[in-house]
Amino acid sequence: MAKGARGASALILLAALGLSACSSTTTTEATSAEGLSIVATTTMLGNVVGDLAACAGGTVTTLIPGGADPHDFSPSSKQVASLVRADIVIANGLDLEGGLVDALNSAQADGARVYEVAPHISPEEFAGSTTPDPHFWFDMSRMADAVELIGAQLATVGTDKYRDCALDQAAEIRAAETQVKATLNSVPVDKRVLVTDHDAFGYFAKAYGYSIAGAVIPSGTTLAEPSTASLAALAKTIKAEGVTAIFANTNAPKALATAVAGEVGYPVEVVDLYVDSLGASGSGAESYIGYMQSNAQRITEALKG
């Protein structure tokens, strides 16, 4: 469904709940050095690939702007051309970048080298589905594996230094995960229950010992639309589970999450998390490791009360 049509339907739904929706956009970012010309699709990949380029050499352009939704981002003609000019394109894959699928396929047909990393990290399926979940980066161990795979791919185009730098960077991510686990483990086991913006936290829950009670948008993409019945059912689930927080997306409207929280019958906090994009400069979540640390801290503070 087109974003405009989805927004219109959302407004109708929100009107029934006595609320209104809003939206936001941001601009692109880039990191540079000498060496390969690399394009990364998401900010998460752009950051880790940028670190590899800083170590081994290269210019990295992040295609999807910080704060934009990778599920519906559509590239400009200039950005499409950059895919073909790059030495290699690093993409997430598994349909995360829904609006980029045609552009990536076209670029490959024109000779671009595109590496989609998510299919190579033993992807999990969405709960109750056979559809692979693309949100692998919420498991830091998988992200470390992905960095090593990306380094190996860059080495086939450039030099072995990319592979060596990737091993060092993966080790840093695994070391940071120890601190993230310690933070998350401080939440009592009976409170490790998540209600999220959309179905993006499956890898997170499995990796760090949490369960998911439900999602405001019961889909792996933000483009899906919840029904009034599904929102009402979620409010009942939240009450039955004794959940005290709904985790929303810093870069998406929170009206639906707020509406659900208001239907529970007791105070439920709506807490922003960084989901499909890193944070802005100075947010503490502008790097991948900072993003995971920030989310862990916010989750812990909300659930511990």
Image (cartoon, grey):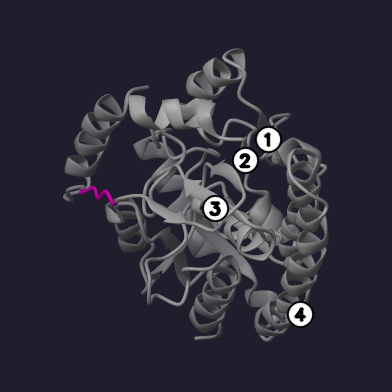
Question: Along the horizontal axis of the image, is 44 left or right of 217?
Answer: right
Q: Residue at left 60%, top 13%?
A: 109
Q: CA distance from mark 3 to mark 1?
A: 13 Å
The numbered mark, 4 or 3, whose residue comes first in the sequence reads 3
Mark 4 or 3: in front is 3
Q: Position of residue 249 (x, y in %)?
A: 41, 57
Which numbered marker is on residue 92?
A: 2
**Is residue 190 visible to the viewer in this orientation of the structure?**
yes
Question: Along the horizontal axis of the image, is 36 left or right of 117?
Answer: left
Cβ atoms under marks 1 and 4 closer than 8 Å: no
Q: CA distance from mark 2 to mark 4?
A: 24 Å
The residue sitting at the front extreme is 34
Which numbered marker is on residue 116?
A: 1
Q: Which stretch did the figure color magenta? A: 22-26
The numbered mark, 1 or 4, whose residue comes first in the sequence reads 1
Q: Position of residue 175 (x, y in %)?
A: 77, 78
Crowd tier of the residue under label 1, counting other residues whose Cα lies within 10 Å: few below 14, some 14–19, many 20 or above: some
Q: Helix or strand or loop: what does disc 2 sit on?
A: loop
**Is residue 123 visible to the viewer in this orientation of the structure?**
no
Question: Along the horizontal axis of the image, is 184 left or right of 290?
Answer: right
